[in-house]
Image (cartoon, helix red, strand yellow):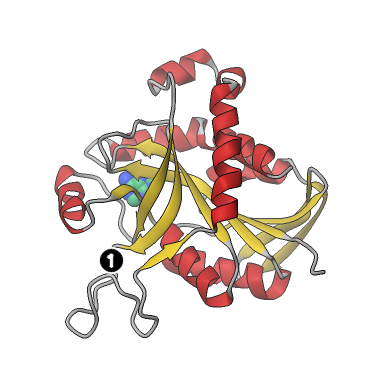
Amino acid sequence: MTQRIIGIMGALPEEITGVIELLKDKEEYRIGKRTYYKGTINDQQVVVVYSRIGKVAASATVSTLILKFNITELIFTGVAGGISNHLKIGDIVIGSELVQHDMDAYPLFPTFEIPLIGKSHFKSANDLIQQANESIQHIFDQNYLHHVISSDDLEQFHIHQPSLHIGLIASGDQFFRDQTQKDHLLELLPETLCVEMEGAAVAQVCYEFGIPFVIIRTISDEADQHSTIDFTRFTEKISNIYSIEIIKHIIK
Ligand code: ADE
């Protein structure tokens, strides 16, 4: 039987350094201007890396995880801008489906379809969605965040009873920073829960290599005129803690 090796990715150090600190028997590998950390979490073999922002950076990184480190599955953890009105800062979204909102080769191919693949939406693996779902419900039900994030910080972001959502994540090389961008996206892809800049690229590469994956995103901002400030504060103070809790509870 092939050995299970889980790749764990985020885009930014602020999303992933806490996870790197969980590693036992850590080894470092420097490839293509990125550092890959191999080790174990809860006795499970993992490789952890941050890709930097954007679809190209994420694609190069996940390809390296697959081809050089032979990962058998991939978990992405990071932040996103909320698009649906039902989402609040501090909520978590599991991307059951991922789409690249900036892919548009129309009229050669339908808008959003990845040319010559014949697909626009990529699905996370059902069993990984299920594992993530149970672990995150557990984190929220047991009030773990209130033990690991100060009341002041929770109050600053109005995080009281965060909730979990499962649905469509849209990715593209664009930071959403005003209502017009949001409205435009909602017109084209009304099911979108949140936006970020890597997930659907990771999803496409995993699909092409047959690697099961799940994309998990914490809402850092509402993808509006306040997003730059909210994003910066949230990634400085909170996102690493969410990543640590999510990963600790999923990898058992
Ligand atoms: N990731 C977190 N917030 C985001 C935003 N507003 N736009 C794109 N990606 C994001």
Q: What amino acid is labelled 1 in the image?
A: Asp
**Residue at 58% from the left image edge and 76% from the top image edge:** 209
250 or 156, nearer to the observer: 250
Q: From what the image shows, is residue 2 above or below residue 166? A: below
240 or 128, nearer to the observer: 128
* Residue holding disc 1: 102
Residue furthest to the top in view is 151
**Residue at 70% from the left image edge and 45% from the top image edge:** 251
- The local crowd at label 1, few if under 14, some if 14 to 19, many if 20 or more residues have their Cα within 10 Å, is some
**Residue at 56% from the left image edge and 35% from the top image edge:** 136
Quarter of the figure with the C terminus = top right
Q: From what the image shows, is residue 141 above or below residue 92? A: above
Visible residue check, residue 137: yes
Q: Position of residue 120 (x, y in %)?
A: 34, 70
Quarter of the figure with the N terminus = bottom right
**Count of marks, rendered view:** 1
Q: Position of residue 247 (x, y in %)?
A: 64, 42
